[in-house]
Amino acid sequence: MITVTSNAANHIKKLLSSRDSKTLGIKLSIETKGCSGLSYNMEFVDTPDKKDEVLNVDNIKIYIDPKATLFLLGTTMDYEEGILESGFKFINPNEKGRCGCGESFHV
Amino acid sequence: MSVSPVCWNCQSAIPPNTFLCQKCNKIQPPKKIDEFKLFGIPEKFDLDLEELEIAYLKLQRLFHPDKYSQLSDQEIKYSTLLSSMINEAYQKLSSSISRASILLKLNGFNSHSEDQSFNDPEVLEEIMDIQNNFLEAENPEQKKNSIQKLNRKISETMNSLSTSFKKKEYEVANRLNIKLSYLKKIRIDFKKQL
Amino acid sequence: MNLIKIKEPMSSKNDAKICLGIDFGTTNSVCSVKVEDKFQFIVDEKGETLIPTLILYNKKTKKFGNQIIKDENYFNSIFSVKRNFTKDFQKKIFEDENDNKISSIEVSKDFFVYLKNVCEKNLNHNVFDCVITVPAYFDEKARSGIMRAAFMAGLRVRRLINEPTAAAFAYGLEKKKKGIFFVYDLGGGTFDVSLLKLSNGIFKVIATSGDPNLGGDDFDNLYAKWLVKKFFKIQFDELDKRERLKLVKNSKLFKEKLTHSASFYEELKVNGCIKKVEINTKDFNKSVEKLIDRTIKISAELLNEVDVEINKVNGFVLVGGSSRIKCISKKIKENFETKIFDDVNPDLVVSKGAALHGYELLNGSDNVLLDVTPLSLGIETMGGLMEKIISRNTPIPAIKEQTFTTHENGQTALKFLILQGERETSSNNRKLGEFILSNIRPKPAGIPRIKVMFSLDADGILFVTATDEETGAENKLSVKTNHELDLNDMRKIVESSIENAKDDIHQRMVIEAKVKAKIFLNEIESVKKDIELLCSVNDIKLIEKNINLLKSSLQTNDCDMINQNIEKLNKSTESFAQKKIEKDFSEVIGKDVDKID
């Protein structure tokens, strides 16, 4: 249901390897925030929530908040390394609009 | 001379009469704007009060501080300023007297101020009559009748005021507006005495 | 566009947007919360939703609410502390468990701490955010007092909302109502009425009125007086305090029982004498009639004032525990041709409205609450009259600007008295505070133009800022109000304490230390000129160094360090304080000598 580019996968692996063994993977969720309503959220997972949907992408465990599945369907996650800032980026075919600051979107 | 303002956050230009950046959606500081433009409603005396209220609520939905309670201090401050401005403008347009004053001002006519002496003998006499009529009323029923009479006078004055605005007779409109404010003042007094 | 970083685990859970709705009542308090679409009331350790607003300090222990109900020291507990917010709530009239004198604010703080702990136990989660309800007719001073107490308890107050508005919000959302509603809210200590327009997610208060000192307590007192006079032929005031409290408690129980049955027999014991007496609705109604008539009068005046015909009003919504008194709905029907809606729990609906609003504040919503200020705000003018700046029933937030000037040549300061109330003479209105504008550039009289902005925010709290129109400098002018810390500063302190505090107790210690430090720094700032005048260069350097030390320790959450630095600064300013006293003293003496001449 979600595609992770090799660039993003490599970076997640790198981040995970630098953490202690109790970290199992990463979790994706959607928050209501920013000016366009919804925004993406990523965090490390030490203790997973039973309700989360678990995906195995490229040997990385990705936990998905059940409330976010609908919004994340078909999304591609990429990693971008820039001069000023680096971080993950979501390319979402469901997005209809995005706010200028880039923090939030609506579907 | 005025430089068109830019967004404090993303520096893109802010079109006149708007308070949200079209690019980054951030709230902007308030700027001077006339009440009719603020609500985007036609500049006229015979205002559709329902239309005004809808426009007012629409703006408060966007700018009330409740919508900004989790954002930066600066944005909270702007929302308080804007929301206050919207509240004040709404109150002014809701009252026919201050609405008339705004219209007079917008049409370049220096409207009456509270302390300006007023000496239109005809109007003064009319007001005295109404007051006497009320004072002479012996029972609550008569007092109520007297107030009803006053109410009729008020709506008559409103009608003439409206006509004078339509005819662009601002001198007349100003006089009628002063009369209206007197009539409304004594109505408050009368109601207190009921 | 923003790139997203991976956050630490649980961080989003810790941010879980939980916002309590706290109805801090005169007799009972109720807390509730909406978490992830589920609304719930909070229950205390006895499983009760209604938590009596009682605090008992006794032998090194503190007890609260239902913990006290069966305690032998029940009659020594603090009752109705909320009533003091309309009086001088800073006065230290109580004693805590260690016999320290404390004020109503501090007592309320302890009660808020208790409520916070109860909620945290219920939710198994730390909570900081809350919406607190206040009587609509509370003035600004009472509102800010409640806010201060909650801040000191480590709660981040997201909004103060009016009790009738909160009730209408919950009622309107639950019953999906539209139209104009009149909320009649008779609580334990306060009476409020609000006229609201409800439409498609908009909750707009048209006008509000009330009496901050009329509530169920007064009914109990009046009925107690009547009982003792009728059955024992004793004047209530002749009884000692304990007997009075016992009698009032009994009359309260009778009142509650009368909502279920019309008459019954009870044993009543006064001054050791026991009598079996008949309790009935008729007597009760008669004894409290004048209070009910007062609520009807306030209701009628409000409808008259706003020019809304009664047939435009969909009905009266009855709120507040005391609205259960049977003859109230009867009286309303007699006086107004209207429907009565009593299909909500009048004790719980206010807290629910606060919790629902709190949820929406933190999670976003299309609903809007638009409220008004209950009382006019103004300043004292010459001759002791009050000049209105913001009149009652003005929608809030409201901002008004006024320009002031000087009366004398070379005048460098202006003093204002800020008032709230409806009376013409200022002494009959409540003093909110004095503020002094200093550092005005000396100019001939009438030349300086000082623009003063009075901002009544969405909480009903007033902020005053002043700008010298000539220089446009806002900060150059110092506006000094009370000795208390600005509520915005307090809010920031609470916010910073939330981020790093180890536990609740630590958090409150941090808040206390920071508030103390900030007040001290403000004091020093206000005498800066005197310091430069009276102290040696070395002393000034030392003071400045200690000021900076204290300021930088304020960035941390290390309360020991903050307290140490307060002490350091205090030590280094000791000699200055002595010199300042001497200087002020000699100035006074000097003036006296002039007079003799």
Image (spheres, coloured by chain):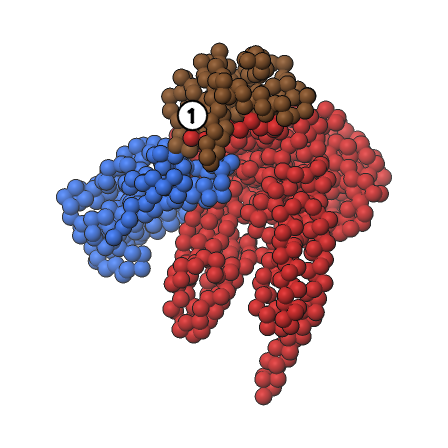
Question: Image check: C189 left or right of C417?
Answer: right
| Residue found at x 79% / y 42% | C57
Q: Chain C is shown in which shade?
A: red
In the image, residue C549 lies at what x, y percent?
65, 55
Q: Which chain is blue?
A: B
The amino acid on which the numbered mark 1 sits, given as a three-letter code, is Phe
| Residue found at x 59% / y 65% | C527
Q: In this orientation, which residue lies closer to the viewer: C278 or C339?
A: C339
In the image, residue B12 lies at what x, y percent?
34, 39
Q: In this orientation, which residue lies closer to the viewer: B121 or A11?
A: A11
| Residue found at x 42% / y 19% | A92
Q: Check disc 1 and report the residue beneath it.
A: A105
Q: Is residue C541 above or below residue C336?
A: below
Q: Quadrant of the N terminus of chain C?
A: top left
In the image, residue B68 lies at what x, y percent?
47, 36
Q: Is residue C440 above or below residue B156?
A: below
Tag 1 subunit: A
Q: Which chain is brown?
A: A
Q: Is residue C446 above or below residue A43?
A: below
Q: Is residue B174 visible?
A: yes
Quarter of the figure with residue C232: top right
| Residue found at x 69% / y 42% | C508
Question: Image check: C66 left or right of C459?
Answer: right
Q: What is the number of callouts on the image?
A: 1
Question: Image check: C324 left or right of A37?
Answer: right
Quarter of the figure with residue C573: bottom right
Question: Image check: C543 left or right of B72?
Answer: right
Q: Quadrant of the C terminus of chain C?
A: bottom right
Q: Secondary structure at mark 1?
A: strand
How many other residues sit within 10 Å of disc 1, few (<14), some (14-19) or many (≥20)?
many
